[in-house]
């Protein structure tokens, strides 16, 4: 396998957690052995949990050492400590491929760059520089330890993966999500699999604002919380020209969240990580500010009459996979 | 990684060539090293070319030995000979995961089971028995050489992958293929990417009959050959109640193929590997005889008014991936 293949393994793994890592970036890592054999592939899954590099190093250590003490440990601090104490130069002929420059700062987790340096890996391949003030500088740490470093500064796939994180640094990131059937219909009852709906609830748990259309609230009477993963529900902006809502529906009863009913989208400016769920009207109102689109396509047809896309549009597929029998696809709009 | 993960790597690779391997089965293989590291993943790509196991063993050999003499060799005979001569017991701690029992017969390629036995792999994991008369018995060969063998006889994913091959043994296999936009539309000009269209041409090259609706021929005036891959065009059955066609269109000019115009689908009974391309009418006429559905979904909307699926249908996704910016998905209909 060539170098780009290892990077693609890391990128592909990272995309599975795109939308779930806020305020951290989605990052993937792949550890490769002396002869080019793949030892491990892992990704950062959630803020507060271990970084991609740490999880990939954990898996590679477990594989090579046959010591499974930390095989299922997710706590970053514990993983750093254990690896530093027990590595016994097992990584000396290994390379690591990361979609983003390993961090230099000690935050919720210790620095990944210093961990890689201390473990004595032979080579580090980085698909994108970290431009943030408090995490950048990982490459310098590695260089100062004489680790062979390769930086692919023009890797478009790594840029696309990192784009939400870059947007949060600048101002905010907006995802427009919808679910449809193969025939394009979005109405007429339940569409997505439980796995797909659980994924959306995980996203809601890390979104600080969820924007929804007034008609959707009136017709579907949704709760719009994160109950499937027992997590915090985001604030809600109901985008509507009228204030005519049944205040008894569950949406208004969720504790600890604000619900705005406004005929403007300006409220979005106060938030960082925004999810928009809506129909055709919402799509048309928002398409100039949306960053990425996330569509769940179920393998059914019939039962609906409306579709989201009724004009000429062209998207670029960023990542496609199967999730619980549905297609889940990240896209950006091509203008 | 667990055993099912290695098998899934093999299965996933094999699905990329589903539709292209006739009369051979789509098969995937994954070679794993002493500690569970992935050494190689490969798949059978086309009849007459090397089997999945041979390609995966070639890649693992190249990786471990650092001898790249056969790294790009696809000729099965040459690979067998080279590996047998040069392996130097390099595979003695390796396992191979295969989606189908390695073959026992010497046909276009020598027996894979005897190759694995001669190379002295430690373990062989087989996800599906080979039930054919002239290729089965691979497991017996391996057992007689005291190779640790594990057979997962109820692996549904392996069954789904192998189903076209099983159908060819019994009588025939029918794929219904269509291309649509995200909004479900199938008309109004070009939809799929060049990569997707090339894939379809590769399929046509190994289909012996292509069935198409009369209206599609009248309106689209398609050639329905395999020119993108410079290969043989399949015979054509135009399913139509009328014989009113412009005989000057390219479809009728392709050398060496038969074109039937018939108001029945009985002609299908004379063929083994059948591809149906059509619209709603064809879909409804054929759905009781179609085995698998193959849909290409382009990330566009607009430009079309008709969709294929206008009634309630439910499919099961068998494999989903991105191809040249489109989604390519194999499905079966759930009844």
Image (spheres, coloured by chain):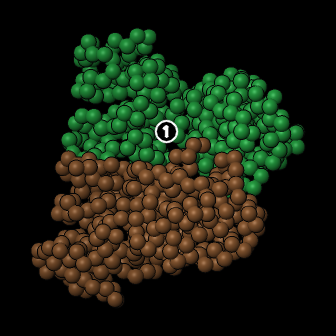
Chain colours: A green, B brown
Residue A85 appears in the figure: yes
* Residue A22 % position (x, y): 56, 28
B219 on left or right of B142: left
For disc 1, the marked residue is A291
Is residue B256 positioned above or below B203 on the image?
below
The image shows a total of numbered marks equal to: 1
The quadrant where residue A280 appears: top left
Residue at the (58%, 41%) spot, across then down:
A14
Along the line of sight, which residue is nearer the eye, A127 or B168? B168
Is residue B186 positioned above or below B5 on the image?
below
Along the line of sight, which residue is nearer the eye, A159 or A9? A9
Is residue A233 positioned above or below B141 on the image?
above
Q: Quadrant of the N terminus of chain A?
A: bottom right
Residue B319 appears in the figure: no
* Residue A332 % position (x, y): 47, 45
Subunit bearing disc 1: A
The quadrant where residue B168 appears: bottom left
Name the residue at the left extreme: B241
* Residue B161 % position (x, y): 41, 58
Residue at the (47%, 29%) spot, across then down:
A203
B172 on left or right of A209: left
Residue at the (40%, 61%) spot, across then down:
B162
Name the residue at the bottom extreme: B255
Residue at the (40%, 21%) spot, across then down:
A227
- How many residues crowd around disc 1 within 10 Å: few (fewer than 14), some, or many (20 or more)? some
What element does badge 1 sit on? loop
């Amino acid at each position: 396998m060539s170098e780009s293949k290892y990077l693609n393994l890391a990128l592909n793994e990272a995309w599975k957690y795109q939308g779930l890592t806020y305020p951290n970036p989605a990052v993937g890592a792949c550890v490769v052995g002396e002869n080019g054999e793949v030892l491990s592939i892992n990704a950062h899954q959630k803020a507060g949990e271990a970084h991609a590099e740490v999880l990939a190093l954990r898996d590679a250590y477990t594989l090579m050492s046959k010591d499974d003490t930390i095989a299922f440990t997710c706590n970053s601090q514990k993983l750093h400590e254990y690896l530093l104490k027990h590595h016994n130069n097992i990584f000396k002929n290994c390379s690591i491929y990361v979609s983003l420059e390993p961090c230099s700062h000690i935050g919720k987790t210790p620095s990944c760059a210093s961990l890689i340096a201390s473990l004595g890996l032979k080579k580090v391949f980085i698909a994108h520089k970290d431009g943030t003030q408090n995490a950048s500088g990982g490459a310098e740490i590695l260089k100062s330890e004489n680790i062979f470093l390769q930086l692919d500064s023009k890797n478009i796939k790594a840029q696309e993966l990192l784009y939400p994180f870059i947007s949060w640094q600048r101002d905010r990131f907006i995802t427009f999500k919808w679910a449809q059937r193969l025939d394009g219909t979005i109405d007429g009852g339940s569409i997505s699999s439980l796995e797909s709906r659980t994924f959306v609830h995980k996203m809601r748990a890390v979104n600080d604002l969820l924007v929804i259309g007034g008609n959707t609230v009136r017709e579907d009477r949704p709760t719009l919380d994160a109950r499937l993963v027992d997590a915090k529900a985001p604030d809600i902006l109901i985008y509507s020209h009228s204030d005519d809502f049944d205040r008894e529906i569950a949406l208004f009863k969720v504790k600890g969240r604000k619900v705005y009913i406004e005929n403007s989208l300006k409220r979005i400016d106060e938030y960082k990580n925004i999810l928009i769920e809506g129909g055709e009207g919402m799509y048309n109102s928002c398409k100039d500010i949306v960053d990425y689109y996330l569509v769940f396509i179920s393998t059914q047809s019939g039962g609906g009459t409306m579709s989201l896309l009724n004009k000429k549009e062209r998207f670029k597929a960023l990542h496609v996979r199967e999730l619980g029998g549905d297609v889940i696809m990240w896209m950006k709009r091509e203008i």
